Amino acid sequence: MTKKVVLKGLAFVALAGVLSGCGTTTNKAKTATASQKTSQQSRRQQLISALPKGVKSTDSDLVLVNKWHKRGEMTFNKSDVDGIAVRSSIVKPLEAFLAGAKKAGYPTTMVSGYRSVAYQQEVWNQSIQTYENEGKSAKQALKLTKEFVAVPSGSEHETGLAADIMNTHWFSTHDNQLLSSSDKNKGQQWLIKHAADYGFILRFPKDGAKSTGIDYESWHFRYVGKKSAAFITKHNLTLEQYVSLLKAHEK
Ligand SMILES: [Zn+2]
């Protein structure tokens, strides 16, 4: 009985948008012309030769989880930052990032950090159940769930290296919702602009959906280390593109 109540709460949270981070997908395929492909190839070569030294695609900070790269439960130590669990290895840079924002005059709220595969599965199942209870067909329930909830084993919150961070004022005056329009807020802009200084990237940038599988999220930050964060941000890459460059370089 108690469990049922808890699950109901989770589903409500999910549908309210808190768990939609990393959930939605798009299929905006674009076709490139032959000359575009050639210039993309040469840009790729330039990027490969400029990659930071001492970084490998297999580094634990660069673990890639998305709907194409699903992972089982990962093992690592966890610690709380502002009451939210993250991988212990990112506590220092994360606390520095949040302290930096506060010092600049923009206090933040940690909305979400580590989530287990099992938790994501519960949220997923409960979402489908809720839609079916509302009279939706199994197919409709699945479609709606995919729009709002990250696929179990395919959410990078399972790595413990991701944090959903919102400017506190904006968050509290927008019904505690995660909305991409939060980037209109100066505090959120500060977070996006300075993330790389602390080793974080905005994981789902504008125009990155084709590569990440997820639409723009102005709140989802991912720790990758300072060298990688600087490179990814400077060259406007996604983590998927960056790891692909590292792999090509290692061949
Ligand atoms: Zn997120």
Image (tube, rainbow, N blue to C red):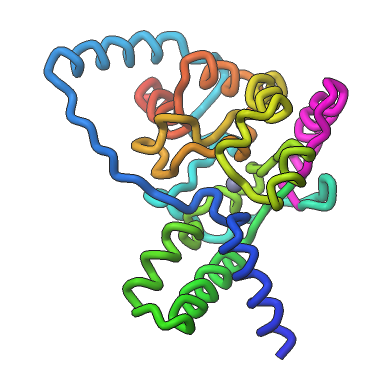
Q: What is the chief secondary structure element of the magenta stretch?
A: helix
121 versus 43 height, above or below: below
- Which residue is situated farthest in the left direction here? 34
Name the residue: 80% across, 26% down: 101
Q: Nearer the viewer, residue 131 or 222?
A: 131
In x, y percent, where is residue 140?
35, 71
Name the residue: 22% across, 32% down: 30
Q: Quadrant of the C terminus?
A: top left
Q: Residue 126 falls in which quadrant of the image?
A: bottom right
Name the residue: 80% across, 32% down: 98
Q: Nearer the viewer, residue 21 or 42?
A: 21
Q: Quadrant of the N terminus?
A: bottom right
Q: In the rendered image, is residue 235 in sight?
A: yes
- Specify start and end residues of the magenta stretch as a single range: 85-110
- Which residue is situated farthest in the bottom direction here? 1
Q: Nearer the viewer, residue 115 or 130?
A: 130
- Which residue is situated farthest in the front direction here? 173
**Was residue 226 drawn as part of the magenta stretch in this picture?**
no
Number of marks in the rendered image? 0
Name the residue: 74% across, 36% down: 167
Q: Residue 137 falls in which quadrant of the image?
A: bottom left
* Image side of residue 215 versus residue 43, left or right: right
Q: In the rendered image, is residue 74 in sight?
A: no
In x, y percent, where is residue 147?
43, 57
In x, y percent, where is residue 116?
63, 61
**Was residue 108 drawn as part of the magenta stretch in this picture?**
yes
In x, y percent, where is residue 242?
45, 26
227 versus 241 height, above or below: above
* Image side of residue 175 versus residue 232, left or right: right
